[in-house]
Image: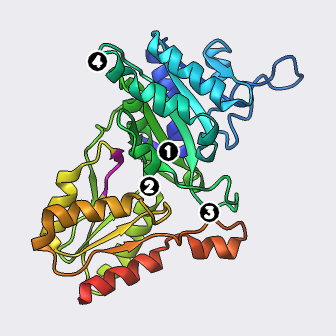
Amino acid sequence: MSRKSIRQAINEALALEMRRDARVVVMGEDISGGMGAPGEQDAWGGPLGVTKGLMPEFGRERVLDTPISESAFIGAAAGAAATGLRPVAELMFVDFMGVCFDQIFNQAAKFRYMFGGKAVTPLVVRTMYGAGLSAASQHSQCLYPIFTHIPGLKVVLPSSAYEAKGLLIQAIRDDDPVIFFEHKAMYDEEEEVPDEAYTIPFGEANLTREGDDVTIVAFGRMVQFANQAADKLEKDGISCTVVDPRTTSPLDEDTIIEMAEETGRVVIVDEASPRCNMATDVSALITQNAFGALKAPIKMVTPPHTPVPFAADLERAYIPSPEKIEAAVREVAAA
């Protein structure tokens, strides 16, 4: 076991699965490169270098550069999955879903249902999301609630390098289409990660902290912010349970409800826009199933309902922060 960044963990997961199964191919923009050009026979590996090094080992027949046409290569990946391959397609930024969404939600997501359960679609769409790098409103959105809404899709939000590797290997081995969300501001964050292959089951939440006073449910990068807030609150005698759902579809409803019932106080942290996001969905879930156990109103910590700002100071104000989470926990703890 060694320390790995999230970028390295994802790259390692891809390489391990490509060595294990010759049906696994990767495709996307600028992930292979070097065609007829002088210099290193490798591309940058996508905009943030996640797939760099795969092409020299696996060749251009399994590491495929695509045209700048998301509708074309996501559609091709869905077809390849339906006919025997296990493609991992890189949708560079999730914001670009607008030009290929039909191939995902009207095609790949419905193949199994429309063919009477006989079709399998082992497709993984890796995509970047989230604010924090001043990439502006067309490259910084958190659109996982939209994909979570679609029956037939599995939606994954890793919160660390360990989670990213295990969840991605699970996604590649899954026989249904998986949308795998990678927060662009987290790629360099490191922790101890096993060198060998391992899987993390979908639909099983992880408790990163356990406490008696307040339950915090957080998604993706917000899990780390919730942990930071919980560590600070612990010093003041407020102990928190932090729930990382890991996947929004399937969602581990049982663990969320159980933890809400144990503390009776809940804060939900979601970087997605506040209308119809995961925070509102989980709030309704808890209210419907554990209302009698609540000792205070549920508090949601989300961005404002605006596009993601470009200016760094406005972007910092937009993103839910550990300080905002701490203030929300203090509010519900005092109720």
Whole-angstrom CA distance, mark 4 to mark 2, is: 31 Å
Quick check: is 69 in the magenta stretch? Answer: no
Name the residue type under label 2: Gly
Q: How is the image coloured?
A: rainbow
Q: Are marks 2 and 3 in contact (CB under 8 Å)?
A: no
Residue under circle 4?
A: 117
Specify the label residue 132 is tagged with: 3
Decide if residue 144 is on the left or right side of residue 130. Answer: left
The amino acid type, in three-letter code, at marker 1 is Phe
The tag on residue 220 is 2
Q: In what element is the residue under mark 2?
A: loop
The Cα–Cα distance between marks 2 and 3, rounded to whole angstroms, is 13 Å
**Quadrant of the rendering where the C terminus is positioned:** bottom left
In the displayed structure image, the side of residue 195 where residue 77 appears, left or right: right
Q: Earlier in the sequence, mark 4 or mark 2?
A: 4
Part of the protein shown in magenta: 244-248
Classify mark 4: helix, strand or loop. loop
Q: Residues within 10 Å of mark 3 (few under 14, many from 20)?
A: many
The quarter holding residue 242 reads: bottom left
Q: Amino acid at mark 4?
A: Gly
Residue at numbered disc 1: 181
